[in-house]
Amino acid sequence: MTLLSATGISKRYGGLMALSEVDFTVGAGEFVAVIGPNGAGKSTFLNVLTGLTPPSAGKVVLGGADITRSATHKRIRAGLGRTFQHGRLFSRLSVIENVMTGAAIRPERDAAYVRDHSRGILASMGLEEVADRPIGALSYGQRRMVELCRALACGPRVLMLDEPAAGLNSGEVELLMQRLTSLREKHELAVVLIEHNMGMVMRLAQRILVLNFGCKIAEGAPAAIQSDPAVLSAYLGEGYGNAGS
Amino acid sequence: MRPHSSLLAAVAVLAIGGVLSVLLADYQLRLLNISVISAIAVIGFNFAFGLAGLISLGHAAFVGMGAYTLAIVTTTLGLSPWAAIPLAITLTTVFAGLIGYPLLRLRGHYLALATLGLNVSFTIVLTNWVGLTGGTNGISNIPDLRIAGFAFHDERRFLWLAMVFLAACTAAAVTLQRSSLGRAMMAVRDDEIAAEMTGIDVTRIKIIALCLSAAFAALAGALFATHVRFVAPEDFSYAHSIVYLAMLIVGGEGTVIGAIIGATLLTFLPEWLRFLGTAYLAFFGLMLLVILIFLPTGLVGLISRLRRGKRASKWGSMP
């Protein structure tokens, strides 16, 4: 069943067409990756879905409700969650306080619940020990994980991750993949992943959407995408499959 | 959150005030009263500037609105000052909420200029609406605060009352700062987009911060009116807004204790440095520059840094 759908999404900046009639759906518990070269419009697409950028045309529907004109915070309360390419944590707040800003999304939650819930999320991601530290005391990888915890604390139905593996070492990427898989299975969470790490994309994604110059050039299962001539030519490179990567 | 911490802060304020009320002479008590009133205004300003990051140069207008509301309704309508205080707070807060909607669409120096314009317009209205405000002559004979015939008319008695208000404001501000609302304000200041992405309604939080700021300012203004028993436009000029900003920066923005330290220090400093004569202003400017460059987190930041250093050296000496 479709949870989030975007139909005919276009975004024009003056003479530049950043997105051109892109259609997209993701269902509950589904893992969809959005890939493409730099400047293909992937982050713009996430911005349109989350309301940071209004589309020039098209419609966004979440759980049957049209959210095309809804403010970002309303979309988050309705069940969207997102992390950013360069990580955007609140530097004046501690680790747990960052997560608590997300957990406090429902006004009926009392302070004790918000704190306990946040601590629980941090513990599930292996960050319990750093809960009371300032953000500045964390490693880059830990900061990315805290941002993920903050997004999870909002209780999303659809989680959008913008290059979550960027800057992480191979061990941290492996850990991230394990946790994303477990989250999806445990909470029936729909995940939309933008990523350049093809190993991660091919291992996690059930479906891949490929953008190039703002247009959707392919969509399908990882095996089909890996051998799609248009994708090989625009992004993966002709030798992708042969190199075994 | 530790609920007792706000209570502890309030008790500390009352204890310090109680001791000082016995030790100080009348003139120093007058200065202390002015610094307590300023501290309430600056604690309020901390919500807008220190927590939510709204660069406002119009805080004195909210203080003035509180003071003039009390002055007008007590002298012309004969209302009790006790009834006038909540009225002054309500009117000023509603005004801040209404003006906040258009004003808070602006950011950074545009917001600073717009709020500066608000303060300048406010004093022009005070000066020219002679029928209501008395113009440049101001309003005199404002009644003092009394409880069952006990008048808070001299400096020592007023200090006891002002300290109770300051303690209550301190406790309320500490509680609010540690609540989800306080965290949301800090999140908005740090990164508006990330704040939206955690479900925070950024516009609403900014308006709440401005309203809280205005409410505390109005209380400070109302207390000022009953303390001095006279109000005039020059007491609420934009220069006073800049002083409130300086008090918060010197003390330490984002902290309640910083607001109190900054307000006290900058009220007493001109007296301590009276021997410098007109050179005081040069000293004041230089001091601000030094603090901005070397102590961007103010005196509270310096104290925290010293405490951290002491702790680190203690750990360093351990086996």
Image (spheres, rainbow, N blue to C red):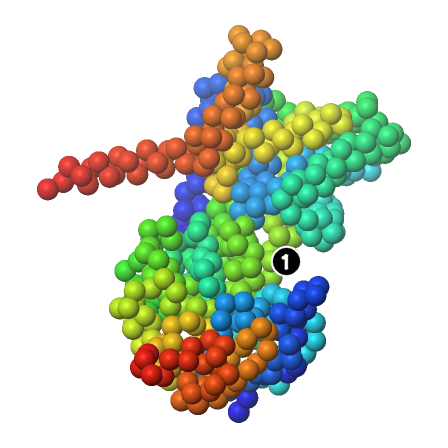
On-image quarter of the C terminus of chain B: top left
Give residue B232's quadrant in the image. top right
Q: Is residue B57 left or right of residue A152?
A: right
Residue B230 placed where, x, y %? 73, 25
Residue visible at 52% across and 13% down? B273
- Which of A57 and B283 lies nearest the eye of the viewer? A57
Residue visible at 58% across and 73% down? A213
On-image quarter of the N terminus of chain B: bottom left
- Which of A124 and A198 lies nearest the eye of the viewer? A198
- Which of A178 and A117 lies nearest the eye of the viewer? A178
- Which of A3 and B79 lies nearest the eye of the viewer? A3
Identify the chain of the residue marked 1, using the numbered disc in the image.
B
Residue visible at 31% across and 82% down? A244
Secondary structure found at label 1: helix
Q: Considering only vertical position in the picture, is B165 above or below A47?
A: above
Residue B134 placed where, x, y %? 84, 27
Q: Is residue B179 left or right of residue B109?
A: left
Q: Considering only vertical position in the picture, is B242 above or below A112?
A: above
Give residue A24's quadrant in the image. bottom right
Amino acid tagged 1: Arg
Q: Is residue A126 left or right of residue B57?
A: left
State the residue position of label 1: B204
Q: Considering only vertical position in the picture, is B252 above or below A72?
A: above
- Residue A191 seen in the current view: no
